[in-house]
Image (cartoon, grey):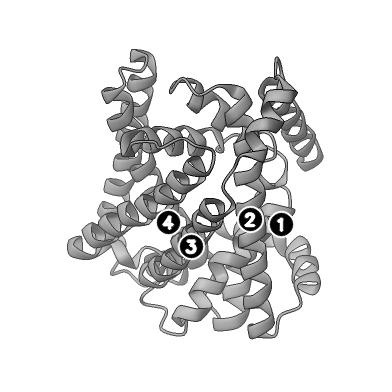
Amino acid sequence: MKKLTFFASLIISALALYLAFSNLNLKEAFAYMKRMNPWDLLAGSLIFVISFLLRGIRWKLILKKSSGISLPLATANIFIGQFGNNILPWRMGDVWRTIMLKRMVDLPLVSGGVGLGVERLYDGIVIVTMGIVASSYYAIHTRMLKTLYTLLGVLIGVFVILLLFLRIFGHREGRFIQNLSRGIDSLKNPRDFLFLLAFSFFIWTVESVSFYYFFLAAGFSLRILEIFLVVAILNLVLLLPAAPASLGTFEYAIVFATKLLSIPKEASLPLALVIHFLRFLSINVVAVLFAFLLGLSLKREIKEVEKEADKVEAEVL
């Protein structure tokens, strides 16, 4: 089944690349690429890394009851997990994060897995909200808005269900209940929930600023809502299963989103390729640095993840 899923993800990536590169004027595309400002590209890359450092703070706060998780470890966990998603299929970097915390601070796999789910819910609410605001302003197709409103309703509904679960069952004994409760500890206090939601909006705003500099490098000074539209569409498209590092789907999403802003493909596609490469490079370099500081062998870690993946999936799900 996994082989079939991986094959399907490769087909999706290949199709996305075909759509992104079709009807492209290569001469104009190379001309746009040559004109890019390297300093703006560097600024965008540094701000992107900062957004991930902020994610480390949020990850520590989500798992606040697990006192053994220091801020440096939580941040390293974020970068190494994304490193895994960049080079391994099936977003196994997320599995890597749970295994790493289990081994280093004995955080139960259930707690880590549920914590990841909560992290995704915060991100989902922010991304969909950004998409709704930007789409409403630019009068994007009504069907898209209805889809976004439905997604937002589902995400909020899941949060409400988790809150009710905590209120009803959170006090009960039992290893599974306690591990699950630890994984969603940040939802127990409404003030913590609202703070983390606001902090998530801040994180995504910082990441959006990185896109401002990336587009500025190509000569396009986008307004904040235009950037929100690009970021929202990009991250919704990245939900599709694809090759490691979202090869193809990343490029197609940028081309599709910028087409709505009347930016020609000859400018948006080379920019998408450069952004994708710089994000890939910056995350991986910082992840390798964290692995060195923690005394981890990434090669050995990857083998461990591949060996333990099925066990993690069975225990968490």
Identify which residue is drawn at 54% across, 82% down. Answer: 105
Q: State the residue lying farthest toward the left.
A: 191
Q: Residue at x 36, y 71 (%)?
A: 61
Residue 55 visible in the displayed image? yes
Mark in front: 4 vs 1:
4
Numbered label attached to residue 313: 2
Please say if 233 is above or below 213.
above
Q: Are marks 1 and 2 in contact (CB under 8 Å)?
A: yes
User: Mark 3 or mark 4, which is nearer the start of the sequence?
Assistant: 3
Q: What amino acid is at disc 4? A: Glu
In-image side of 199 versus 245 (left or right): left
Please identify the quadrant where the N terminus is shown.
top right
The residues tagged by marks 1 and 3 sit, at their Cα atoms, a distance apart of 28 Å
Q: Amino acid at mark 1?
A: Asp
| Real-space CA distance between mark 1 and mark 2, rounded to the nearest whole angstrom | 5 Å
Observer-side mark, 4 or 3, equals 3
> What's the CA distance linking mark 4 and mark 2?
18 Å
Tell me the residue that label 4 is attached to: 119
Q: Along the horizontal axis of the image, is 265 left or right of 152?
A: right
Give residue 184's position: percent from left, percent from top. 37, 63
> Which of the marked residues, 4 or 1, is nearer the chain's N terminus?
4
Identify residue for label 1.
Answer: 310
Per the image, label 4 sits on a secondary structure element best described as: helix
Question: Residue 35 got which mark?
Answer: none
Question: Where residue 17 sits: x, y (%)?
Answer: 71, 28
Say which residue appears at 78% left-offset and 64% top-offset: 307
